[in-house]
Image (cartoon, helix red, strand yellow):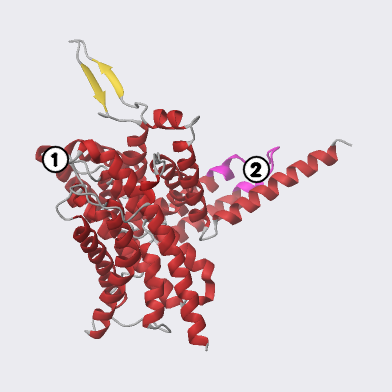
Amino acid sequence: MQLIPMYAWTKGIRNFEHRNRMFSKKPWAQGVILLTCVIVALLLANLPFTKEIYHSILETSLAINMGLPDGRNIVFPAGMTVEKFINDILMVIFFFSVGLEIKREIKYGELSSPQKAILPVIAAFGGVLVPALIYTCVNHGTFSASGWGIPTATDIAFAVGILSILGDSVPVSLKVFLTALAIADDLIAILVVALFYGGKINMALLGLAVVLICVILLMKYLGEKRTWFYFIPSVLIWILFYYSGIHATMSGVVMAFLVPMKPRFTKAYYFRKRNIYRRRLLEYDAIDEPGGFPNGPQRHCLRQLSKTSKNCIGLSYRLEHALHPWVNFLIMPVFALANAGVEITDLSYFNVFRYLPEIGSVSMGIFLGLVIGKPLGITLASFLAVKCKLGAMPENSSWSKLFAVACLGGIGFTMSIFVDTLSFGDHPELMNQLRDMGKIAVLMASLCSGLLGVIMIRLVNALQKK
């Protein structure tokens, strides 16, 4: 009688695991989880019985204090808190994953040839320049001026997730166009962070990092493809970047471009080894052990064959595949939980058109930059590229459809919030307030851009069917 409930329980567990796997494979799954984390973070930061706990956890120190015999203390990493751990260490893994994806697309994907890359890349530059100009026009000469980089990014997870929900309403060529544009946009955003949102540069430490990068390049040129030979230098480069004034997340991008894509073993080597181990498996089959197949020698053969198979895939591909679920379903949700928790003291946070003398309006600049600047910049840049015959119009599309899809480019979210966390450091007295207002503006603008994109795509399709 007890077996029936146990069977039902184990069946329920298997069904849950199956549904969980199926959910994680949906292109919109990451967006749903991120949106949920944003809502949870806002609740934690504003509910009277959770906001103190929420902020105290983020401000908890994670630095290691090491006492020296002479009485001095060494703190490493300096100033490390839970929030900085998320933004300066976990986000390194995110940027490393983004760097691997960009490198793959440049090498073999949608950015691999001038014909494929030229239109999305030009469109991406337009989608960066116009929002930055709009923001600068709104906030020129004010305390908010340094946040011009916030409305320049596109969140690929949300944009592609919405496109997948729309299904056949959007031509495949425009889906590819927006995906390639978002990848190029990520690369531009990385350059913006590296060039404009670092601290005061320590040239000596930066020089050491460059020397170490050159050593890794030499090691890669000599054919080294083992993981540990790249992992240990990655940690050292992160430390040098962290203390040199270059934002630590840039170390992830640098290492992504240094990791080899070429596999350790060739196809001929794999087939030769596979045949050897197959023969040995058959030979060792005569050994009778209580456990049956595989016996001890056969297990050794299978382990060696598995190791050989693994090394026939390039380290870059292996790392990208291994990190993908961790980045999408752990690191990004944790980032959203830590950075979207804005304590809203009054309704002025939602007034995106509020402008104050000297302070400016970070909200207006971000909102107009993402909702209006992004689609306008992407469409105008694409139009100029096509008219100048630098790029070709995506197949089965029109300018109205391209503009409708470009509206989804205004979904900034992850990268925009990340740049917001780096902005306004030159005004410490207003920094937290400006950053909080910026985060709310990013969330509102991303929501409006997503809704606008869906409405525009539906509207264009309806008009074209008449």
Magenta segment boundaries in residue numbering: 284-300
Would residue 430 be counted in the magenta stretch? no
Q: Nearer the viewer, residue 285 or 169?
A: 169
Residue 269 visible in image: no
Q: Quadrant of residue 52?
A: top left
**Label 2 amino acid?**
Ile
Does 145 appear above or below 62? below
Q: Nearer the viewer, residue 401 or 331?
A: 401
Which residue of the protein is positioned furthest toward the right in this rendering? 1
User: Dot 2: what SS?
Assistant: loop
Residue drawn where x is 35% and y is 68% of the image: 180
Say whether marks 2 and 1 touch (CB < 8 Å). no
Which residue of the protein is positioned furthest toward the left in this rendering? 203
Q: Quadrant of residue 261?
A: bottom left
Residue 271 visible in image: yes
Numbered label attached to residue 287:
2
Q: Which residue is mark 1?
A: 200
User: Dot 1: what SS?
Assistant: loop
Q: Position of residue 420 (x, y in %)?
A: 29, 48
Residue drawn where x is 31% and y is 26% of the image: 63
Residue drawn where x is 53% and y is 56% of the image: 29
Residue drawn where x is 69% and y is 44% of the image: 13
Q: Quadrant of the N terminus?
A: top right
Q: Position of residue 49 (x, y in %)?
A: 50, 29
Does 285 appear above or below 3? below
Q: Position of residue 159 (x, y in %)?
A: 43, 63
Q: Nearer the viewer, residue 339 or 26?
A: 339
Q: Disc 2 and disc 1: Cα gap in Å? A: 67 Å
Q: Nearer the viewer, residue 373 or 194?
A: 373
Q: Which mark lies nearer to you, 2 or 1?
A: 1
Does 334 appear above or below 180? above
Mark 2 is surrounded, within 10 Å at the Cα level, by few (under 14), some (14 to 19) or many (20 or more) other residues, namely some
